[in-house]
Image (tube, helix red, strand yellow):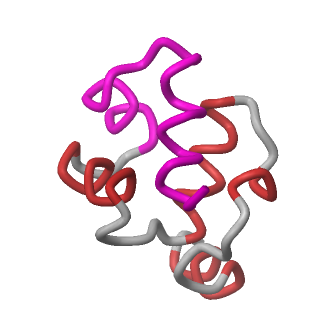
């Protein structure tokens, strides 16, 4: 199962539409659709938000997210 499929499978039981999910984690609806279809990979800071919103550990999404955690944290300080 791809990271995108895992994101979709985590979002659905949370009862969230793509639009609701995007508004909770920050990117555009289009970005979430790209992730779920495997066209793009979310950056690490979005993976942390996805994990928080879905209540799943970030590690449960398997493949490494695009980006570097330290770099993402530095940008948001």
Looking at the rendering, the stretch of residues picked out in magenta corresponds to 1-25
38 left or right of 71 in image: left
| Type of secondary structure dominating the magenta stretch | helix
Q: Nearer the viewer, residue 11 or 50?
A: 11
Residue 57, placed above or below residue 12: below
What residue lies at 68% left-to-right and 43% top-to-bottom? 51
> Residue 20 location in percent, x, y?
33, 24
For residue 17: magenta? Answer: yes
Q: Residue at the spot x=34%, y=71% of the render? A: 40
Above or below 76: residue 20:
above
Q: Residue at x 76, y 37 (%)?
A: 56
Percent across and percent down for residue 9 are 55, 34
Location of residue 43 with respect to 16 vertically, above or below: below
From the image, which quarter does the N terminus lie in?
Answer: bottom right
Residue most extreme to the front: 1
Q: Is residue 21 above or below residue 66?
A: above
**Image quadrant where one finds the C terminus:** bottom right
**Residue shown at 60% from the left, 33% from the top:** 10
**Number of marks in picture:** 0
Relative placement, left or right, of 43 versus 56 is left
Q: Is 3 positioned to the left or the right of 42 in the image?
A: right
Residue 18 x/y as whole percent: 30, 31
Q: Nearer the viewer, residue 73 or 57?
A: 57
Q: Is residue 5 magenta?
A: yes
Residue lying farthest to the top in this orientation: 15
Percent position of residue 52, x then y: 68, 38
């Amino acid at each position: 199962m791809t990271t995108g499929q895992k994101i979709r499978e985590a979002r659905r039981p949370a009862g969230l539409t793509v639009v609701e999910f995007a508004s909770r984690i920050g990117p555009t609806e289009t970005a979430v659709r790209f992730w779920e279809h495997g066209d793009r990979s979310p950056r690490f800071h979005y993976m942390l938000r996805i994990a928080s919103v879905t209540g799943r550990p970030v590690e449960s999404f398997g493949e490494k997210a695009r980006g570097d955690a330290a770099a993402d944290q530095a940008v948001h300080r």
